[in-house]
Image (tube, grey):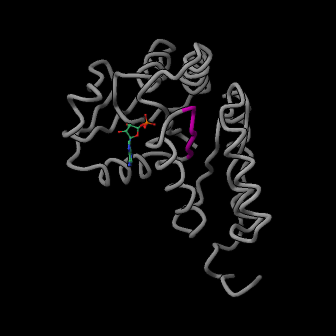
Amino acid sequence: MKSICVFCGSSYGALEAYADIARETGRAIAEQGYTLVYGGAKVGLMGTVADAALAAGGKVIGVLPRSLQDKEIGHEGLSELHLVDSMHERKAMMADLSDAFIALPGGVGTLEEIFEVWTWGQLGYHKKPCGFLNAEGYYDHLIAFLDHQTEQGFTKQVMRDMAQIASSPLDMIRQFENYTPPSAPKWINRDET
Ligand code: AMP
């Protein structure tokens, strides 16, 4: 594992603790010797995580669609900032550049991004780990719903277990380092119940 991608809010959220966890995450990624890949913005928790990784001497790669350059404001201090033509290109490039994916607290954009890489893993397109950093219990309701989905037979337990859950960035990184992907992608077993 060389690079860790962080998806997180383009806002700060209601609690100061969310910014604290974003700072801790950026710092931990840099201090553990990993490159941070993220959406390239200066705003919200996205800016916070990047600033913290840079301050800790880390390498930070941003990927920002040109159309969002005004709205999300490209970070000028990054090791690399890739400007791309669409959101699809952004997500594909972030996925290619990264070996693992963390969702910090965020909005619908954050969820869309982490669910996309998780479902790609589920389909066997890649074997990279992904997880939710459940700071301040932010993802408690989502985790309960994911368990409900599994109990109701829409998600297999092995797929549910692909998504790591941690309450600190260091725990998440350790889980990634010890991660073993499921041996068979979903569609190989699609007829099994
Ligand atoms: P949010 O979590 O909604 O604050 O957004 C976090 C990041 O996700 C931002 O960089 C947004 O540009 C991005 N984003 C927002 N909506 C979408 C979407 N529908 N698909 C993919 N990314 C999105």
Magenta stretch: includes residue 180: no
Is residue 192 shown left or right of residue 124? right
Q: Where is 10 relative to 18, above or below?
A: below
Magenta stretch in the rendered image: 100-105
The picture places residue 122, in percent across and down from the top left corner, at 60, 65
Quadrant housing the N terminus: top right
- Label total for image: 0
Residue in the image at 64% along x and 82% along y: 188
Q: Where is 145 relative to 166, above or below?
A: below
Quadrant housing the C terminus: bottom right
Q: Nearer the viewer, residue 112 or 82?
A: 112
Q: Quadrant of residue 38?
A: top left
- Image region (quadrant) for ligand 1: top left
Magenta segment main secondary structure: strand
Is residue 44 shown left or right of residue 21? left
Residue in the image at 69% along x and 87% along y: 191
Magenta stretch: includes residue 103: yes
Q: Where is 30 relative to 104, above or below?
A: above
Q: Quadrant of residue 17?
A: top right
